[in-house]
Image (tube, rainbow, N blue to C red):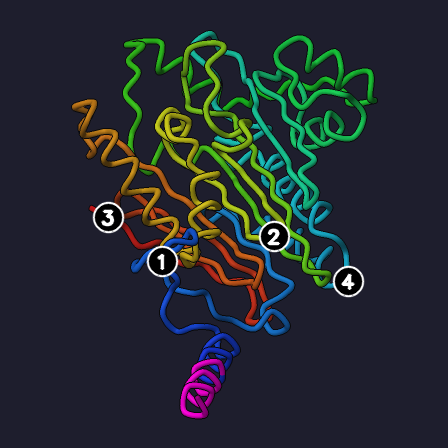
């Protein structure tokens, strides 16, 4: 009997030590698999942090960091950050200066999400420079989560936003040139610099995200991609992490990409591996549909609760910007093909 008690005591001690050590091997049967590594990291060392898509994310990050470094909250940071890109006429696929649709109209999409599952979104919005701020107003001042088209415009005006002509001369000339042949053939890593998605973790450990775009150039009037759709272009779960997407929105919508990335992080995958698994899912779906994957580019970025970040894309060319205690730096995303 004494030997049995001693064996039991030894087993409990070993088990307790394994649990305190974080369990080096993932648990199978509780949402984990053998391919799901336990995430490690120091929360105190890795926040605040802001991460955003493409090289224009560097400037956007600067705006967000001004909020974060002074102890500001993540929702204010992401709105401030992406507004930098929305207002820049040299960035021809977001906000002011964005390329028009095939009817010559600049239509904008945006969404925003905070750490308490509050969400707001606008789609096919015309004549308003900062759709992300209208999306936030939808979140905070209406019982709805999404407004579109004329309804979104009417709401924006009622909230004090001013109508502006968003079609700059350079975009107008490109549109006139496009009309000569009127061909719609999206180009990987050219036309798909069409979104700025941004994620932030503030000093209080809260996550938020925003996503805004003028969409693909010369799209059909009324076309909406993944950017304003919560769960597709953006998703935030303050217990786990956040993710956002860029690229061919139709492919991201098809498998609710950003939500999938967050759920994979919930299962124990690191941000990078979660993004990779989501990209692999997109490739698998494209193959089922006999879609040429070489014509598709999708990139994900992800940020977990600990301040760890990662990215993955379908094919090379996608970059993302990260601003943390190490400064504001551009990273090349790993890719599958």
Mark nearer the N terminus (3 vs 2): 2
Mark seen at residue 239: 2
Mark nearer the N terminus (4 vs 2): 4
Q: Residue at x 63, y 65 (%)?
A: 47
Q: Residue at x 71, y 58 (%)?
A: 68
How far is disc 4 from disc 1 in space, using C-alphas?
42 Å
Mark nearer the N terminus (4 vs 1): 1
Mark seen at residue 28: 1
Q: Are marks 4 and 3 in contact (CB under 8 Å)?
A: no
Crowd class of label 2 (few under 14; some 14 to 19; many from 20; radius 10 Å): some
The answer to which quarter of the image holds residue 328 is bottom right
On the image, the x and y values in percent for residue 200 come to: 61, 52
Mark seen at residue 15: none
Q: Which residue is mark 3?
A: 336
On the image, the x and y values in percent for residue 78 come to: 65, 46
Give the structural element (helix, strand or loop) at label 2: loop
On the image, the x and y values in percent for residue 6 come to: 45, 90
Look at the image and say whether residue 31 sits in the magenta stretch: no
- The residue segment tinted magenta is 1-12
How far is disc 3 from disc 2 in space, using C-alphas?
29 Å
Q: Which residue is mark 4?
A: 70
How far is disc 4 from disc 2 in space, using C-alphas?
23 Å
Q: Residue at x 66, y 27 (%)?
A: 129
How far is disc 1 from disc 2 in space, using C-alphas?
21 Å
How far is disc 1 from disc 3 in space, using C-alphas?
27 Å
Give the structural element (helix, strand or loop) at label 1: loop
Mark nearer the N terminus (1 vs 3): 1
Look at the image and say whether residue 10 sits in the magenta stretch: yes
């Amino acid at each position: 009997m004494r030997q049995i008690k001693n064996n039991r005591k030894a087993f409990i001690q070993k088990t307790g030590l394994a649990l305190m050590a974080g369990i080096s091997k993932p648990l199978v049967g509780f949402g984990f698999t053998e391919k799901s590594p336990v995430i490690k990291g120091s929360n105190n060392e890795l926040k605040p942090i802001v991460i955003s898509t493409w090289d224009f994310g560097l400037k956007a990050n600067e705006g967000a960091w001004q909020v974060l470094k002074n102890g500001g909250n993540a929702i204010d940071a992401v709105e401030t950050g992406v507004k930098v890109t929305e207002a820049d006429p040299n960035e021809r696929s977001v906000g002011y200066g964005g390329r028009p649709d095939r009817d010559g109209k600049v239509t904008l999409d945006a969404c925003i999400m905070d750490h308490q599952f509050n969400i707001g979104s606008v789609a096919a919005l015309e004549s308003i420079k900062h759709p992300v701020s209208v999306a936030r107003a939808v979140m905070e001042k209406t019982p709805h989560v999404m407004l579109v088209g004329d309804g979104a415009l009417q709401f924006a005006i009622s909230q004090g936003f001013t109508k502006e002509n968003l079609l700059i001369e350079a975009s107008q000339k490109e549109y006139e040139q496009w009309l000569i042949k009127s061909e719609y053939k999206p180009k990987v890593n050219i036309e798909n610099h069409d979104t700025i998605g941004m994620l932030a973790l503030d000093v209080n450990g809260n996550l938020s995200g925003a996503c805004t775009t003028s969409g693909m150039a010369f799209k059909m009037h009324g076309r909406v991609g993944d950017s304003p759709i919560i769960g597709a272009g953006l998703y935030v779960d303050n217990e786990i992490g956040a993710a956002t997407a860029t690229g061919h929105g139709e492919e991201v919508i098809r498998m609710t990409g950003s939500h999938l990335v967050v759920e994979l992080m919930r299962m124990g995958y690191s941000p990078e591996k979660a993004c990779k698994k989501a990209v692999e899912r997109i490739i698998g779906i494209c193959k089922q549909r006999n879609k040429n994957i070489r014509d598709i580019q999708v990139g994900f970025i992800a940020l977990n609760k600990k301040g760890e970040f990662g990215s993955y894309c379908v094919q090379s060319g996608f970059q993302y910007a990260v601003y943390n205690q190490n400064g504001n730096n551009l990273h090349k995303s790993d890719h599958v093909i």
